[in-house]
Image: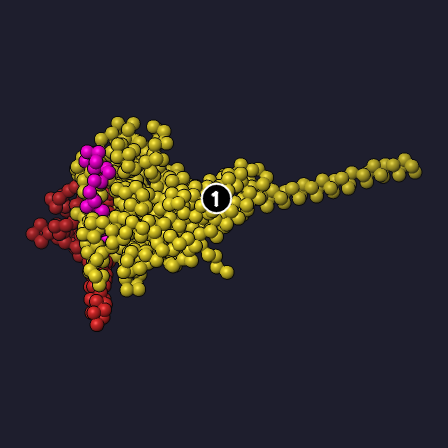
Chain colours: A yellow, B red
Amino acid sequence: MPGHSSAARARRVPKPRFLAALLVASTGLAAIAACQPKPLDPKAALIARGRDLFFNETFGGNGRTCGTCHRQEENLTLTPAFIATLPKDDPLFVAEFVPALAQNFENPRLMREFGLIKENLDGFDSLATRFTMRGIPHTLALGTSVQSPAGPRTGWSGDGAPADGSLRSFAVGAVIQHFTKTLDRVADVDFRLPTDEELDALEAFQLSLGRQADLQLPLPLKGVVAQRGQAIFMDNAVGKCNICHSNAGATTSLGGNNIGNTNFNTGVEDLPDQPARLTGELVPRDDGFRTPGDSTFNTPPLVEAADTGPFFHNNSVETIEGAVAFYSGPAFNRSPSGRFLASTDPKKVGIQLDATQTVQVAAFLRVINGLENIRQALADLEEVEGLGFFERARGRELLERANHETDDGIQVLAGGGLHPEAVTELVKARELTRRAAGSLFNRRGYTGDAKAAQARARARLIQEAP
Amino acid sequence: MITTTRRTRGMRGWLAGGTFIVTLLWGTSFAHGQKSTEQYIPIGKSPGLSGKYTSIGLLTAVDARTRAISVADSAGPKTLRITDTTRIWLDRSKLKKSNISGSFADLVKGRRVEVKYAAPDRRDVAEWVKVEVAQP
């Protein structure tokens, strides 16, 4: 009996252990399953595909991608300061190391000194003399800025896309202009054209970038300087900014009706001493929309302006204060748009802001840019919180973007001497976001703390809704 | 009184300006596609345009006097006018050569072409014509 009893016990003993092991294993599997990436919905999958194409696809060309000029870490544009950090063999510089592109493809000096890119908008028949030199526009808030009653307006002059002129077709023109291996520009030899599926994905990705809706001004701002800047911005008798940049966006509001994105001749081409021309390099006059051009350029959104300079289509003004000051100068006030504004003014004046007022409008633009940086950073941090444990790469990407936004927020506010308390909170948020990116087990904790710091920064800039 | 007059003048200015801009906008109610890079897109490959706002087919007639061409596309024959502003390009992509500008003389009966209408409601006028050059 004892023997039997012992044998029976021996048979029974493993059972609880086995059950415990089974429990641990199933709990572990459930935990792992919970940490796995969730399947993307079709729209998110299309955007993810578009992101991959935008930053990685060379379309069989010279090595450039859309992201070569529209850098994620540079607000989807490029500045000379950033260009100076790039290695010599970066595809941006193909004109410097690909013999077939050495002449008439880019002007390396103007690219490096002023961030200017060569565009043959009026045709490819006279490459040495017929071109424009333009800055790289960011691709943020496109969903709010491209549409007009006359159809989509893409690029600086509204005619950036071939075919149907849509944002979807934009990539086709960009590949032909910027990705080619030789100046022959032969499809399926020097590049391949994007497929319909790729164009859908690229469009979805671009439309997902940045703000998805316009602001509703006035905002309950806390700083008196930015408050005054907002008042001037919105006053159609003083700043008159809100007419063409309704709600600091890219659409025009006339008589209470929003008529979408609009092209204007504001006289930027008439500015004296344009930096690129000071070099002695050939910089032909840019005639804007259509061929031959009508000297108009389309209206960019202003919310994203302060951290995406230099300004205007030719990068002719370095600071946001300088860009605001342009509208009180003779180049603008003598332009068709300036004269139109003057014609609507009871005193027949265009825009005449003093230095204090100019800086106040710029301060307003800096603050709303800072608020947009915080909004985007918070959105990225929230997405990180929703990621599974194993979605490390996506998490790092989002945290990196959140920190770029935070850096920008710090720069736009500190650069204008605005809201030092908010800047302090943003510096904390940046450090916490860095910790989140480097943490294996406490990513969510640091992310939550970074969000809180961002929220405190925002509360310094604007009165929160009760 | 002075204020009222100024306001009235201001209102007139706004109205005139607004009318000017709206007229300008609606006068170009067809999305504007950039022409320079269009030249390098092979026949039938223009996104959003090819087959929708273009005719693709063989040239069945060319009238130099009236500057009209007829295209046999899949929906039937179409006749379009070539104007002074119509762009004509030679699509040499099948020869692996660069596409170049052409002229009315390149519109030869029997050649395959793609013709873009000037506007959705102006399908009798060509904005551009791509002429396929398949042999050296």
In the rendered image, is residue A93 in sight? Answer: yes
Q: Which of A365 and A285 is in front in this view?
A: A365
The disc labelled 1 sits on which kind of residue? Answer: Thr
Q: Which residue lies furthest to the left in this view?
A: B65
Instruction: Look at 74% across and 40% down and name the residue there.
Output: A18
Check residue A296 for magenta coloring.
Answer: no
Q: How far across and down, in percent of the image, does residue A382 sit? A: 51, 48
Q: Which residue lies furthest to the right in this view?
A: A1
Check residue A277 for magenta coloring.
Answer: yes
In the rendered image, is residue A395 in sight? Answer: no
* Tag 1 subunit: A
A136 versus A85 height, above or below: below
The residue to which callout 1 is attached is A424
Q: Nearer the viewer, residue A102 or A461?
A: A461
Quick one: quadrant of the N terminus of chain A?
Answer: top right
> Does B68 sit left or right of A389 as displayed?
left
Circle 1 packing at 10 Å, graded few (<14), some (14-19), many (20+), is some
Instruction: Look at 38% across and 59% down and name the residue there.
Output: A218
SS at mark 1? helix
> Does B58 sit left or right of A430 as displayed?
left
Instruction: Look at 17% across and 37% down and name the residue there.
Output: A129
> Does A128 sit left or right of B47 as displayed?
left
Q: How far across and down, in percent of the image, does residue A134 sit? A: 26, 41
Report the span colored magenta. Answer: A264-282
Q: Nearer the viewer, residue A186 or A155?
A: A155
Q: Which of A147 and A424 is in front in this view?
A: A424
B4 versus A364 height, above or below: below
Q: How far across and down, in percent of the image, does residue A442 sit? A: 58, 41
